[in-house]
Image: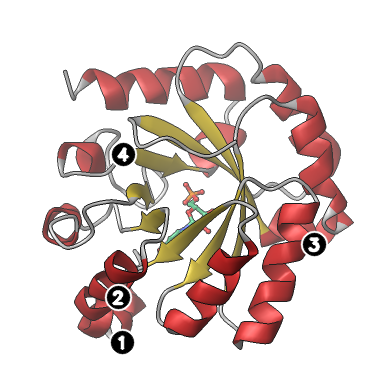
Amino acid sequence: MRLRKELGLVIAFDMEDANLAANFAKDLRGAKGNFAIKIGRTLEMQTGKGIIAKIKEFSDLPVIYDGEIADIPYISKKIAKNAYDAGADAVIVHGFVGSDVLNEIGDLGQGDVIAVVEMTHPGSDEYIQQISEKIAEMVEEIGVDGVVLPATRPERVKKLVKIVKKAYVISPEIKAQGANPGNAILNGADYEVVGRAIYEADNPKRAAEEIYKEAIGRCH
Ligand code: 3DU
């Protein structure tokens, strides 16, 4: 199931309790909104790639494997293939590693390729931000399916979406690191990524629906 280029929320599954993750995936069935699930390494490390299959079994939402893949083409492709074979609809790969890695994974033809173009944390000023416009040009030329841009820097989202025109944009760091729901979407993102503010809430399903409503509500 490919992600569509439309407004929505990607829920980061970074919890370290696999049972909690599976129950939350089940609970999200029928949640009001356009959602996708992103499985991070912190969750995957608990059980291995089996967690991808388990979440897919319990959920009808698109599942992204966020391995932040950044290795040589041969290894990156193996990691991506393992994730796709386990049921992932998309994988996240770093753009800075270069076009050969992205092409190698794209050639598998098993699902979406989402490239990290720029990051959110302060340290990303030191290196990745210096080259992110070049990364954006490269991923646009290759034709990846999605890109990751930083919600904490809405002005960067605005600038980078002028370069990356075809791919859908997912933007992390809503709430936990200060960005407000809707900020990235108002600046050109398609999906906002929310982790802790949802899965650490007393009622995660309700938190997902509320944050979705808040983000999308600002865009009409
Ligand atoms: O801060 P939160 O708990 O809402 O989670 C943010 C998620 O976004 C988390 O899964 C992290 O891995 C991801 N992320 C990126 O993919 C890229 C970034 O530059 C920053 C966070």
Q: Is residue 217 left or right of residue 6?
A: left
Query: Which of disc 4 and disc 2 is earlier in sequence?
Result: 2
Residue type (three-letter) at the residue carrying disc 2 = Met
Name the mark nearer the viewer: 1 or 4. 4
Disc 3/disc 4 C-alpha distance (Å): 29 Å
Q: Is residue 55 left or right of residue 191?
A: right
In which quadrant of the rendered image does the C terminus lie? top left
Disc 2/disc 4 C-alpha distance (Å): 20 Å
In x, y percent, where is residue 158?
Answer: 13, 53
In x, y percent, where is residue 52?
Answer: 77, 46
Q: Which residue is mark 1?
A: 127
In x, y percent, where is residue 185?
Answer: 24, 38
Query: Which of disc 3 and disc 2 is earlier in sequence?
Result: 3
Q: Which residue is mark 3?
A: 45
Q: Which residue is mark 4?
A: 190
Please name the colour scheme applied to the rendered image: secondary structure
The one nearer the camera, 85 or 159, is 85
Disc 2/disc 3 C-alpha distance (Å): 31 Å
Query: Which of disc 3 and disc 1 is earlier in sequence?
Result: 3
In x, y percent, where is residue 143?
Answer: 36, 62
Q: Of helix, strand and loop, which one carries label 4?
A: loop
Neighbourhood count class around disc 1 (C-alpha, 10 Å): few under 14, some 14–19, many 20 upward: few
Neighbourhood count class around disc 2 (C-alpha, 10 Å): few under 14, some 14–19, many 20 upward: many
Residue type (three-letter) at the residue carrying disc 3 = Met
Neighbourhood count class around disc 4 (C-alpha, 10 Å): few under 14, some 14–19, many 20 upward: many
Query: Which of disc 4 and disc 1 is earlier in sequence?
Result: 1
Q: Which residue is mark 2?
A: 138
- Above-or-below relation of 124 to 36: below
Q: Is residue 41 left or right of residue 176?
A: right
Quadrant hosting residue 105? bottom right
Residue type (three-letter) at the residue carrying disc 4 = Asp
